[in-house]
Amino acid sequence: MQTAVTKRGQTVIPAAIRKRYGIGEGDRLEWLDEGGCIRVVPVAGDPVKALRGRGRGEGLTSRLLEARREDGARER
């Protein structure tokens, strides 16, 4: 999908992308300059609510405990 930039620096977010990511009027977007590309990321109104449940099934607790054990072994 392509859009044009106006002389005021504005552009349109294609309807399919707005629907897929639930972007509506008044929502905020974060522009990330990654050197070779630009990413546009929707900013959640309630970041805690948006992230709730994202780490399930990832084994985060066991990975954290293993990393702590490795750190402890290196410090000895």
Image (cartoon, rainbow, N blue to C red):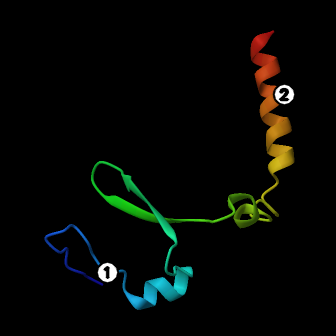
Tag shown at residue 69: 2
Residue type at mark 1 is: Val
Residue closest to the far top:
76
Residue 73, placed above or below residue 58 = above
Where 70 falls versus 4 (above or below)? above
In the structure shown, which secondary structural element does the residue marked by tag 1 occupy? loop
Disc 2 to disc 1: CB gap under 8 Å: no
**Residue drawn 31% across and 81% down?**
12
Q: Which residue is mark 1?
A: 12
Percent coordinates x, y for residue 73 in the rendering: 81, 18
Residue pushed farthest left?
Answer: 7
User: At 82% from the left edge and 36% from the top edge, which residue is drawn?
Assistant: 66
- The residue under label 2 is which amino acid type? Arg
Q: Pointer 2: residues within 10 angstroms few (<14), some, or many (20+)?
A: few
Crowdedness near tag 1: few (<14), some (14–19) or many (≥20) residues, C-alpha within 10 Å: few
Along the viewing direction, whichever of 7 and 34 lies nearer the viewer: 7
Residue at 47% x, 84% y is: 18
Looking at the image, which is closer to me, 67 or 47? 47
